[in-house]
Amino acid sequence: MTRRDTIKCVHEPFGDAFYYGPERLSARYENDIARRVNSGFNDSTYQTVFDRFEAEGTEGKRLFIKDMAHYLIPPGGKPASIAPSLARKERGVGTPNPSANGKNGVQQTPYPYHTEPEPGNPTIVPEQLLKMFHFTFLIRHPRSSIPSYYRCTVPPLDEVTGFYDFNPSEAGYTELRQVFDYLRSIGHLGPHVAGQDNKLAAANGLSTANDSEMNGSSDKIDICVVDADDLLDNPNGIIEIFCKSVGIEYDPKMLDWNSEKDDQEAKEAFKKWPGFHDDAIQSSALKPRLHKAKSNHDENSEWLEKFGEKGAKVIRDTVDANIRDYEYLKQFAIKAT
């Protein structure tokens, strides 16, 4: 957001279609029509999200889109098929689909869609559209992210966020790994790993099966994974490598946003999800933290004290269920000296 001269930030646009629109995948507001309507996004489809990208791009700036992988994947391990508004079979590109799912004109729960899947594609977005993006994957250890998210779904913060129950499927680690592996499998990412000794990475088995076919190709996108703990410990080092990977000129001033204009921009960007980004809104810079993340403290006791027995168990179960996917992605993370 500090590079407004060359970059336009778009914050979690796919959540509009995922939670509120006629192609929604989430059941969170399935029985709350008023909430969907009052959100202002009840008509949002996955196509209208892409239409927004096209409109935002007319300013001549590069788009920086922060979003969640699980907004693109049916929850609960359900098989994916292409979102109706994005389906192009026997229709022109952009031609509206009259209904996501329904019989005799009666709208039903939108998913599953009456559309065809793409072989191997775990998302509801066609491969050709996914290839429009230069992906970076931001990860955070579940022991930090899960209790942070749980806090937003219980009193008193739930009255601010509007999320009145914790849904483990929204943790998103499995879906993030699915998208990551799919993009590698189709050759959109890799084999080069940003911020790593790639000979060492290959020796450790991090190369794709088709590395020999992809080596020497200059149009491949780096595998770029940023771990939040590494970022907080060494923001300058991590952001500099990230910028090099995605083709942005690095400037240490990017990590300071202590101005009224910056504050207004942040509040505008985050207002759609009240309560979730208060710490970011109240910040003014990204500086190395004074204390590194705890790794061996008694987290169960901490969660029990904060959230009670039931909450602590839900958090423990959800953390444990997602550590494997986190650790898989962690091996690809940028390493800065």
Image (cartoon, helix red, strand yellow):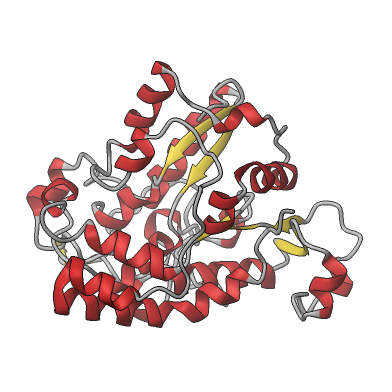
Q: Residue 298: x, y in percent?
A: 35, 76
- The image shows residue 127, relative to residue 37, as above or below, that is below
Residue at the farthest right position? 216
Q: Residue at x 75, y 43 (%)?
A: 244
Compared with 15, 192 (above or below) is below
Kindly give the residue lying farthest to the top in the view shown: 260
Q: Residue at x 48, y 71 (%)?
A: 295
* Residue 180 position within the rendered picture, expressed as x and y whole percent measured from the top left: 59, 67
Question: Where does the image place residue 221, in percent across and percent down from the top left?
Answer: 73, 54
Viewed as shown, does residue 250 lie left or right of 314?
Answer: right
Tell me how many marks there are.
0
Q: Is residue 249 left or right of residue 51?
A: right
Q: Is residue 288 visible?
A: yes
Camera-nearest residue between 281 and 33: 281
Residue in view at x 46 percent, y 59 percent: 87
Q: Is residue 259 left or right of residue 218?
A: left
Q: Nearer the viewer, residue 271 or 42?
A: 271
Residue located 46% across and 46% down the image: 94
277 sits left or right of 70 in the view: left
Q: Nearer the viewer, residue 123 or 252?
A: 252
Where residue 103 sits in the image (x, y, percent)?
18, 69
Q: Quadrant of residue 307?
A: bottom left
Residue 138 appears in the rendering: no
Above or below, comparing residue 153 to residue 42 in the picture: below
